[in-house]
């Protein structure tokens, strides 16, 4: 089954449409399209997303998913995905705590963290944007991280992307 991720960052309402910034462009989504895009932030497959949308009483969920994929606001994870997208961090890194040295918080200073992630995912959040693509990040990991190839690093990177997107502390952006 094909995994689907949301692309872009919510930029608010304009008239009756939700604006999503995708790279240097914007997409205007209707309310049901925005609901589908929001639900896609959970790491999911297309059939699971359609089922979740149906459970949330979003009419024509499959049609909306297909339309958002064709517009580039949702992306299907295929062999070229990691070459075509990069991860951009949102919010501030809050570090770890003396109570849990292995987990790192992300959010707004002075408020409760929005996400608490392991060191590998925190590194992706913190440094992934420096690489020109997710694949380039995998290449770096294969060189300086645990032994392996970029392909063997990809599964862990996708896990991290999924976690960061589901906590809304990072966004996917197409590579320019």
Image (spheres, rainbow, N blue to C red):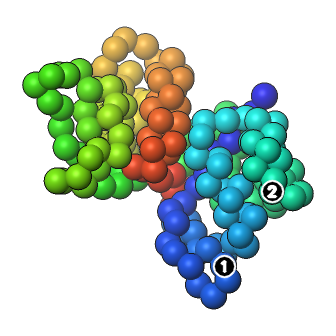
Residue at image location 51% in from the left, 42% down from the top: 166
Query: Looking at the rendered structure, which numbered label has been put on residue 68?
Result: none
Residue 137: % across, % down: 40, 36
Position above or below: 153 against 173:
above
- Tell me the quarter of the picture where residue 66 sits: bottom right
- Name the residue nearer the viewer: 5 or 81: 5
Disc 1 + disc 2, Cβ < 8 Å: no
- Tell me the quarter of the picture where residue 29 sits: bottom right
Residue 43: % across, % down: 60, 36
- State the separation of the CA atoms marked 1 and 2: 16 Å
Q: Is residue 10 left or right of residue 132?
A: right
- Name the residue nearer the viewer: 72 or 18: 18
Position above or below: 97 against 20:
above
In the picture of the structure, the residue carrying the numbered disc 2 is 58
Residue at image location 62% in from the left, 55% down from the top: 38
Q: Quadrant of the N terminus?
A: top right
Around disc 2, counting alpha carbons within 10 Å, would you say few (fewer than 14), some (14 to 19), or many (20 or more)? some
In the displayed orientation, state which residue is furthest to the bottom. 15
In the displayed orientation, state which residue is furthest to the left. 98
Position above or below: 130 against 116:
below
Q: Is residue 72 visible?
A: no
In the picture of the structure, the residue carrying the numbered disc 1 is 17
Around disc 1, counting alpha carbons within 10 Å, would you say few (fewer than 14), some (14 to 19), or many (20 or more)? some
The residue mark sitting in front, 1 or 2, is 2
- Tell me the quarter of the picture where residue 76 sits: top right
Circle 2: element type: loop
Residue 58: % across, % down: 80, 56
Residue 112: % across, % down: 26, 46
Considering only order in the chain, which callout, 2 or 1, is on the residue closer to the N terminus?
A: 1
Residue at image location 59% in from the left, 40% down from the top: 42
Residue at image location 34% in from the left, 31% down from the top: 117
């Amino acid at each position: 089954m094909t995994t689907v991720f949301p692309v872009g960052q919510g930029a608010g309402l304009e008239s009756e449409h939700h604006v999503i910034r995708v790279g240097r462009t914007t997409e205007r989504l209707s309310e049901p399209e925005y609901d589908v895009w929001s639900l896609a932030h959970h790491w999911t497959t297309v059939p699971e997303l359609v089922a979740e949308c149906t459970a949330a009483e979003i009419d024509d969920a499959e049609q909306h998913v297909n339309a958002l994929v064709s517009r580039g606001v949702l992306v299907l994870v295929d062999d070229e995905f990691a070459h075509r997208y990069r991860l951009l961090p949102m919010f501030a890194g809050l570090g770890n705590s003396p109570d849990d040295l292995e987990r790192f918080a992300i959010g707004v200073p002075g408020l409760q963290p929005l996400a608490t992630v392991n060191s590998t995912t925190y590194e992706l959040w913190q440094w992934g944007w420096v690489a020109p693509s997710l694949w380039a990040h995998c290449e770096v990991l294969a060189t300086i991280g645990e032994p392996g190839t970029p392909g063997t690093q990809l599964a862990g990177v996708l896990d991290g992307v999924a976690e960061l997107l589901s906590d809304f502390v990072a966004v996917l952006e197409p590579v320019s």
